Amino acid sequence: MDGSLDFKTLRESLQAALVATTRTANSIASEDLQFQRTVNPAVGSQLDNSSGRLLNLANGLLKSTANLTGQKVGALEDADDVDIQWRNIVDVIDSLLEKADTCLDEYTGLIKRKDAPTPADQGRAQKRVKSSNDRLDWSLKRANILKPQNNFERKVDNFATGPWKPLLSSKPHAKVSLEDSLTTFVDDDNNTQYKHPYETEIKTTPYPEHVYKKREPKEFLPIDSTSAIWVDTYEGVLEMLEELKQAKEIALDLEHHDFRSYTGLLSLMQISTREKDWVIDTLQPWRHKLEVLNEVFADPKIVKVLHGAFMDAIWLQRDLGLYLVGLFDTYHACAVLGYPGRSLGYLLSKFAEFEADKKYQLADWRIRPLPEEMFYYARSDTHYLLYIFDMLINELIERSTPGKPKPDLLELVLERSKDVALQRYENPSYNVETGQGPRGWYNVLLKSPTLYNSEQFAVYKAVHQWRDNLARREDESPFFFMTQQVLADIARILPTDKKALWSILDSNAKGLKPYLDDLFDVIQKAKEEGVNGPKMIDIFKSDSSTIAPAKRAAVISDDSDIPDVKELKADRSQFWGGVTLSSVWDGTAAKTAKLDGMLEITLPYPADFMDGTTTEMEVDQPEEMAPAPQPEPEQVVVNQEFTLRSGGKRKREEESEEEEEEEHAEIEDSSAPHTETDAQTGGEAEGDDSDEEEEEEDEEEASDKSSKKSQKAAKKASKEKKKQAKEALRAQRRAEKAAKKEAKKKAQEEAAAAAKQAEGEEGEKEDQPFDYSQAASVLRARKTQEDVKKANKRFNPYGNKSQEGPKGARAHYSAKAAGRTATFKK
């Protein structure tokens, strides 16, 4: 390669070569290679040689890259191995591309090595340009080093049961003695736990007076002019302790590692004052002696400033026996002040104009000696925190001015900080049968969309317990041996042999190879025991039926504070006001209606419309009950024609005819009762001539009925006229339809005659012999311009789908026209 080529030319040449190679590979893959092997054996041998050469190149590349990144990839013997080890290959290639990306950024000047600012950078820290590569190097994320916990003077017991006892050997700044502080209690899960040894001191000791006063923010010193001291000896800890005792506030931060340890490791501690920064190695064998820092950490006169200290408070007491009295958590200050961001990176950017590279949060902080970029990141977390503390205190005081109807924001932050400091560490145990506990399977399966049967559920619980015991014994994280996805795959697939089990394990679970036989035996035993065992859904049903009633009973039993219902009832409705909706809800007498003195009905009427008395409803009793109609015998259905989907036009015509017939029947029925009524009226008049009033009423009724009869006759005449007009219109339409049908039939006959004549002419032409000399070539046929356009035309997936592209099945479907009918026989 010519060294005189600049980077741009080199990049363009590499890109062109890669594009050409990719196109060639795609074109080869689109061919039918098996057919080519059969037709031309030479092509098959060339393909085999090329495949072998590519496999050798891939093996060499993967081997060199795996050595560089610390990853393991097996040899690729054939093309099938590429599919089997695809995950490992992708991880190695990703790491290689990340390194190439970083090198290109450094070569082009986009980023520089993460060194400390030069002395020329005064004042606030300069903003750093973020790299386009935001991933952490694999060697810094998963370092292959010896376990430091093996050298600890005080070993960790991962199989400890019962309550976790605090590691304190003494209690500085105590209001309650150490012996009286180490008492037990029963928590909500009926487990015995030790109380927080500094609970009384945290709750009752006030913060220093200067915390409640506005102050002039003390500008942080330039990071290059302050001392960053690495502390890895006990003598260095004592020297640092003497300087910390002179401070009013200290900034504190921790770095933790939990991948190669069952409970986790507190790997690094950063402490800053206004003048100095310390970085303490907490992985030394004498780490338990750091308990001496309680002389500062438990001193209520010294404010400890941390950000997001929820887990920090637990890690300190679990590993070092340290407790925080006088904590100020800047995270809760962000929450109370309503900042859009609540991370430490947001505060550094807002107040210090410093852009922290937070990818080192995922780094392996067990690495010794600590790389320069990781040391700089750890120091920067606390270097600016005291200045941020001053700015937050001033803003909290300004927005909590006494006399205004606002809460005391500063006091709210201090109370929340106390709650964080009162967190306690507990042993990570769980119930194997129910899965309850911090390391249990219950909460994991509760969020899982998979429902396991009895065998799968038994295998899941057994493998989960086996993985947990192995992690405790080897002092590793359970996820180091087996991820949650691999555990779920084993339970779902139920491998029948060891080879199938090995194929399920991913690259991260290859460390289980020495334990493969033991794991397979656990799976087979669980399958046999789980045949008649409970299903996964049965566990959740039983828990919901047992736990929920207990909680409801606890709530119901504690009803001392529940007021009486009369106290909760309002005298005036918020919606209706003073309107009385029903006599049931006021003090007046009930408004009821009685039927025969037996039934009382409450009427929901307002009292304004009722007189407060009981209204008796008179019900006319019939003299004789009409006999119940006898059911008609079922008619035998005879085979007859019926019509499906009758047209809308014909349906409307039939409905109009039915309406006219019903009206005609009503007129005839009305005339018959009228005659009977006249006869009855006349008979009654002859029998009782003295009753003149009844005669007048009969005459009025007769006149009314005669007028109604005349009106109905007029309506009937108008309907007859309309009916005749409709009949005439129908006859006209039938004639037009018949004429159209006749014309269509004639046109079809003419077309058939023309087609028959054309077939006769073609038959005469077929009798003539074919002249092959004048025929066009088939193999070398000339393409017309239309053929070329069709061949070059590309399918546009974003075009109008109604004009281009393949048609779906629904495109050829033609809906039935409305009004068509089909006749069937039963």
Image: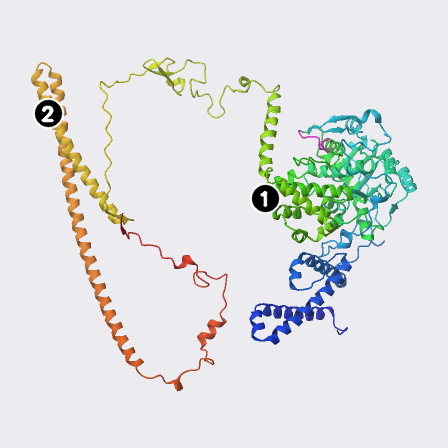
| Image side of residue 77 versus residue 122, left or right | left
Mark 1 falls on what kind of element?
Answer: loop
Work out whether residue 13 or residue 635 is closer to the camera in this orientation and state it.
635
Residue nearer the viewer, 325 or 556: 556
Res. 389 in view: yes
Q: Is residue 695 above or below residue 90?
A: above
Examine the structure image and report whether residue 409 is included in the region drawn in magenta. Answer: yes
Which residue is denoted by mark 1 in the rendering? 450
Residue 769 in the image: x percent, y percent?
33, 84
Residue 716 sits in which quadrant? top left
* Camera-side mark, 1 or 2: 1
The amino acid beneath tag 1 is: Thr
Which residue is label 2 attached to? 678
Say what secondary structure mark 2 lies in: helix
Q: Is residue 116 visible?
A: no
> Considering only vertical position in the picture, is 222 above or below 683?
below
Give the residue displayed 73% in from the left and 56% down from the top.
Answer: 131
Q: Is residue 760 left or right of residue 363?
A: left
Q: Earlier in the sequence, mark 1 or mark 2?
A: 1
Image quadrant containing the N terminus:
bottom right
Q: Is residue 246 magenta?
A: no
